[in-house]
Amino acid sequence: MAEPRREVWITGIGIVSSLGEGAEAHWQKLNEGKPSADTQTFAPCVVHPIVPIDFDKQIPKKGDQRQMEPWQRIGTYAAGLALENAGVKGNAELLGRMDMIVAAGGGERDVNVDSAVLSGLPKSDNPDKFLNERLMSDLRPTLFLAQLSNLLAGNISIVHGVTGSSRTFMGEESAGFDAVRIALARIQSGQSDIALVGGAHNGERKDLLMLYSSGGYLLTGDYKPVWERTPQGGFALASMGAFLVLESREHAQKRSASPIARLAAVVAERAKRAPGDVTAALDTMWGKLSAQGSIKAGQAAVISGATGAEPATAEERAFLAKHADLPVRATGTHIGHGLEPQFSMNIALAAIAAKHGKLFAPADGSGFEKAMTGPLRQAVVTGVGHWRGEGLALVEAVN
Amino acid sequence: MASLRDKSGRPVVVVTGMGMVTSLGIGKTDNWKSLTAGKSGIRTITRFPTDSLKTTVAGAVDFPETAAPSSPARSERFAEIAIEEAIAESKLARGNFPGPLFLAVAPIEVEWPEREALAKASGANGSVNYDDLIRAAASGRFREFHERFVFGSVGHHLADKFGTQGSPISLSTACASGASAIQLGLEAIRRGETDAALCVATDSSVNPESLIRFSLLSALSTSNEPASEASKPFAKNRDGFVMAEGAGALVLESYDAAKARGARILGVIEGCGELADSFHRTRSSPDGKPIVGCIRNALADAGLSPEDIDYINAHGTGTPENDKMEGMCATTVIGERIKHVPISSNKSMIGHTLSAAGALEAIITMLTLEHQRIPPTINYKVPDPAIPLDVVPNVARDAKVTHALSNSFGFGGQNVSLIMARGPA
């Protein structure tokens, strides 16, 4: 059997989204309940764009910035914020043994090159040769590195010096659940003392809008809060970066670091997505979470990662209805859906709420999100992938 | 029965099933025969026209049973074949694997045939742009594109087919991915989370754009004639790696669980080390410290010292820089004795299978331990005085191998080293 698990604290948060940068800016905007969705730029698709960022503050070398595409810049920036927040930035000894797990998709394509090739192919006498020649001459050599999934982690190693380990998980929302799950398990079991975990996403990308449009998953037309998107549903693609510093309690105390919150448990599942499967998977995971930390009504809330895409969101809602004594907040209403980093972001937002000891206000005209008056001690974070993957986390206030 | 623990008190992790697909063939038996005969799987590319390309050779996997319409579909097919073989050998139940899946897989993206289909369907005349593609995509006529080209598709399909437990992890640490998949399985069993793990790595990146991307980084060999001599690790005339495809699958189990069900133990994963390099996106730190540290971490994890290593399965890509750095770092770790420690590169025969390399080479290392015979580094005609190592030139060799080291290094500063041994009976 496994050894007794060590307690794990969240000691650093680095987040940036359409709401702003850092814990306090997010807390303030969540309470104001004013999402910043863009319905025009990528119409008919609704997108949550990233706020303007002064990248120089976390990525001092312009040369480094030039080597990255936006998703890598956002992520490297957010990782720097998290390291700074945890008080470990620049601590070479510690960063040299720090774990890193990044949840990542891939970098964007050069849409101008693609468009020129697609326009030229039908007119070409030899389309295969034409494709080869155009790609050989038009692709920037370094674009590949800005597209490779593991190069966000690579850039974090280069810019911030995190080198103890470097692992990149892929697979949309699942990558986010599993990154945090494995980072937590490694610390709980003593395989590691401290980890940087999270991801980044650039949602202002037409190549991704094309992919998710093909599956019929996107919110189009007017912006609506997550719970008001039925029956057709849809998620609003978002840009965001979210990193957490996770640390064993002993390690944090030894360096006099204070906790933002405790990460008590993370579980993930693979429902095959027949009707009812998602609700059943969430039920199973709820049982596992409850076994690791008693969830007490009156002091607990749900930070939902519901994307708005159907039927996943309706199935999550059916699960949440069984726990009606826990007030719910869907962060997708505020910050949209960023796939891989969404779970880390929602754990960060849950930790911030737990630290404040209260939940932010409802932002939902359907009445599903209820006010919470009592103090907040626990938050269950949900994640239900738009296509596959289910995850839950339990975040608790410390003291 | 007393539980078998390693020197650090952790469960001993063994291999009870392996399967492989490379350009040399399907299955361990055929591959081992070719590898020990010094055969090359590198051929002139026929999958697509190579007009105007500098590199026209690859270790593409093009057998009738591996054919599929896209890179993710092919990599899924390769993985299925490798997993079938591994699970059959392990004698575990098919379709209900008693542990999680860790899958090393190349990053996935929509490919040119799909973009062309959308462009055509958009009805745009003259110039086509992404607004046209999005409009066509939203028509509902291309729903299958989504499932095929999300990053999680290969992993979820394999998890469904083989009935693995829990959330399947798809991962990429570039050219170290296959070793990382084994590392994740090793760690999960050591944590006591599971008694078994299915560790798989697959790659099918031989398509025009992927080839061009590596070509633009000047990473590929351009020695196109004859194709079989393009990959020449450690030779002075080495001029880059050769892209290749394949899949490897390993069934990992705790020794206790394997013994309890009477499984045949093929070998032990004794240790794994990792250390990232913060020097550059594609180049190793010139002082070699991250690679040296990575190998030392693996030794420490295995509870071994450098004197215990008697064979190194090299990353050995055949790029001028990699082989020089790897030789230098191996020498730093092993010391004077390196002259008597054979170090060979499977990539001389099967090419660089990218995401799959770490797992395929771990399997070949296991076979090396099992047969006590080292596959050669072929195409070694011009020794490089800067790398004065015993690279097992051109011809396989019998040898006593007890503890073997397998290295994997990748873009983005990824370094992973595995240490393997023959199994306790």
Image (cartoon, helix red, strand yellow):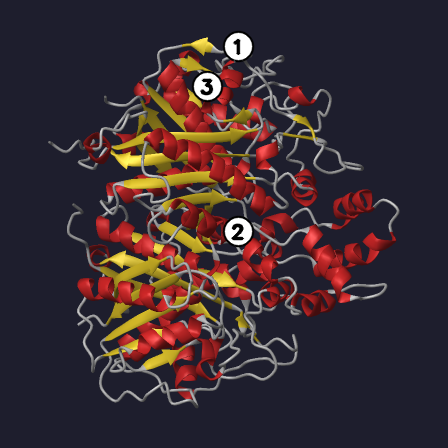
Amino acid under disc 1: Val
Count of marks placed on residues = 3
Amino acid under disc 2: Ser
Using the image, tell me which numbered label, if any, was put on residue A164: none
Q: Nearer the viewer, residue A161 or B22?
A: B22
As displayed, is residue A1 above or below residue A279?
above
Which residue occupies the extreme left position in the image? Answer: B1
State the SS at label 1: loop
Q: Quadrant of the N terminus of chain B?
A: top left
Asked if the residue under mark 3 is in contact with the one under mark 1, i.e. CB atoms within 8 Å, the reply is no
As displayed, is residue B59 above or below residue A41?
above
Locate residue A126, reporting x and y percent.
85, 44
Q: Nearer the viewer, residue A26 or B35?
A: B35
Locate residue A284, reporting x and y percent.
27, 63
Q: Are the residues flagged by discs 1 and 3 from a single subunit?
A: yes
Does the rendering let one see residue A276? Answer: yes
Q: Which residue is mark 2?
A: A149
Q: Chain of mark 2?
A: A
Whether residue B402 sits left or right of residue B278 in the image: it is left
